Image (tube, helix red, strand yellow):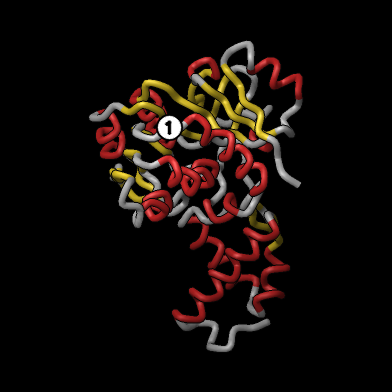
Amino acid sequence: MADSVPAGSARSQEHRRQRIAEHVVRHGTVTVTWLAETMGVSVMTVHRDLEALARRGVLRRFRGGVSALPTSVFESNLDYRLGVHVAEKEAVAREAAHLVEPGMSLMLDDSTSVLALAPLLRDKAPLTVLTNARRVLDAFAGCEEIRLIALGGEYSRTHDSFLGVPCVEAIEAVAVDLVLVSTSAMNARMTFHQEQDVVLVKRAMLASGARSALLMDHSKVARTALHRLCPVAGFDHVVVDDRVPGELVGELREHTEVRVAQVRG
C-alpha cells in the first residue's frame, strides 16, 4: 500500500522507514523488491531508506535484501530481539529471580533476557539496581523501594542503552553483590558478542560483582561471535531454558553451576 502523503516529504519518508523496519523485524529477512511493492515506491527509494536504517543500526543490508537476524559479526536491533524466544526468556528470568534476595545490590545489563527479569525484581525490594539500559530504568522508575543508579555513556540506538568509556568508568567506580547479564552466543567453554563496545561494558560489569549470573535462552547456545567475552567458568551461575540439549548442559556443568528453567506451554 502506498503512503497517503507524497513519497518525497519528510513525514512520509520517516513513516515509510518505520514501516520498513517493522516489516523486517517481523519477517527477519525480506527482499528489496518485496519492500518496494509493499511500500508502493521505487526500488531506488527503498535502497535509500535501507541505507538510512542501516546507518542507525536497525537492520543489516545484503545483496538484494535486508535482515534483522543476527550473525557472528552483527547483533540484531533490540526491537527484533524483544519479539523472539519470549517464552524462553521469561522462563530463564523466573529462574534467575531466585538468585536475588531483598537488600542486595544488583547490576543489570541491556540484554532482553535481563529486561524480562526486571519486572520480577519488584517483589524482591528493597534493592539497589545499577544499569546502563534505558528500558530497565523505566521498569523501576516508579518503585520507591528500589534505589536506582543509571550508568551513563554514549547512547546506542541499536541497544537502547549507554555504552563507551564513560559507562565503563562509571561501572569501575562501584562494587555490587550480583551482576546479571546475557550475551549473544555461547559454547560449552566460552561466551561471545559481536560488538567490542558491548564486550568492554559487560566485562567491566562482571569485574564489579561479588557474584555473576549469565542468562541464556537456547537460541544463543552452541554458537560463536566475533569477540570473546568471558569463559563460562568465569560465571558463578548460568541459567538456560529446558530446550538446551542435555549434553551441552552437562558440559556446562563441568565449568560452573547451571540452572535449567522450565518453559511453560
Res. 258 image quadrant:
top right
Q: Is residue 218 above or below residue 142?
A: above
User: Quick one: which residue is furthest to the top in this view?
Assistant: 254
Residue at which label 1 appears? 101
Which residue appears at 53% of the width and 23% of the height? 237
In this view of the protein, can residue 156 be seen by the observer? no
**Residue 201 in picture, x, y percent from top left:** 38, 34
Which residue appears at 30% of the width and 39% of the height? 167
Relative to 168, is 220 on the left or the right? Answer: right
In-front residue for pair 190/254: 254
**Residue 7 in picture, x, y percent from top left:** 54, 83
Q: Secondary structure at mark 1?
A: loop
Q: Is residue 77 above or below residue 164?
A: below
In this view of the protein, can residue 155 be seen by the observer? yes
Which residue appears at 58% of the width and 13% of the height? 255
Tell me the amino acid under the disc marked 1. Glu
Which residue appears at 64% of the width and 83% of the height? 2
Res. 205 image quadrant:
top left
Q: Which quadrant would the N terminus be assigned to in this image?
A: bottom right
Q: Is residue 192 above or below residue 125?
A: above
**Residue 63 in picture, x, y percent from top left:** 67, 53
**Residue 97 in picture, x, y percent from top left:** 51, 36
